[in-house]
Image (spheres, grey):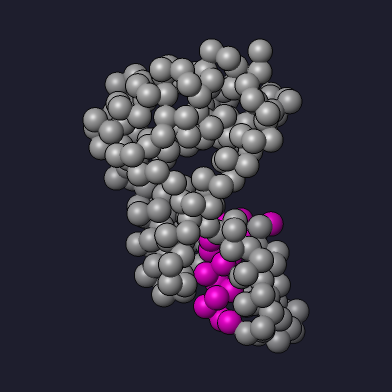
Amino acid sequence: MPTTTDIDPAFLARVYQFERDRLTKILPCFAGGYSLPKVWRPDRGVWTKLAAATAGCGVDPVRYVRWSLEVNQVGYPPVVPEPNRLLERRRLGLYQDELPRVHPAIELQFKIETETASRHMTLHEKVYGREPDIARLTVAAEGQSLGLSPLFRYTFARSYGGVELTRFARRIEPEALFQFSEAPVENAVVYGASGHLPHGFARRAAPLYAGVVDAFAASRKGVRA
């Protein structure tokens, strides 16, 4: 994925389209997905202005677009910002104010997920009488229903190892990389401290996200009328 200094404005358009489409699949009031209308097509000046505006204040433009289209930001009923609204200084300021809170939030979530996983392993071992390796695999495999994120389940599986958990970690790795790419600096600190992120994992997160975004854009076959 391009850095803040060499970002391709057209890529920002694709990120916006992808993230807004994801939003339509999360919120029940939307239907039919999202494709860029002609007014916001990738060659429009708004994307060049957005790249310049974010570079001017040292903001990662891709991360900023993703943040702007999060459920917590659009509210409910949702008020989804059109691309030109992303240029507002107030919105950029709110994003910058939010950044220092990201690390503590991820750290807290990691702690909660660790406690949840531990509690359910104990349940499977002490109550259901399962062997430890079976209990760990069950928690990893059923973790989504327990509120465990892909990145946590990935590092959890790698922390115990073994054939089945290693296989599970490989299977869930793309989802873990996608989650990591949302807040790479903070995730690197929190999850890196666990010692269970493989070498080069952080470097692969951004390219994976970019590949997903570009594949989605290709599937749209251009902009809508």
**Predominant SS of the magenta segment:** helix
- Residue 7 percent location from the top left of the image: 37, 37
- Residue 221 percent location from the top left of the image: 68, 29
Residue 68, relative to residue 175: is it above or below? above
- Foreground pick, 169 / 55: 55
**Total numbered badges shown on the rendered structure:** 0
Q: Quadrant where the C terminus lies?
A: top right
Residue 100 visible: yes
- Residue 64 percent location from the top left of the image: 40, 35
Residue 27, relative to residue 175: is it above or below? above
Please state if 50 lies on the left or on the right of 125 as rendered.
Answer: left
- Foreground pick, 13 / 123: 13
- Foreground pick, 94 / 34: 34
- Residue at image point 35% right, 62% down: 189
Please state if 22 lies on the left or on the right of 129 as rendered.
Answer: left
Residue 159, relative to residue 37: is it above or below? below
Q: Quadrant of residue 147?
A: bottom right
Residue stretch in magenta: 145-161
- Residue at image point 60% right, 17% down: 37
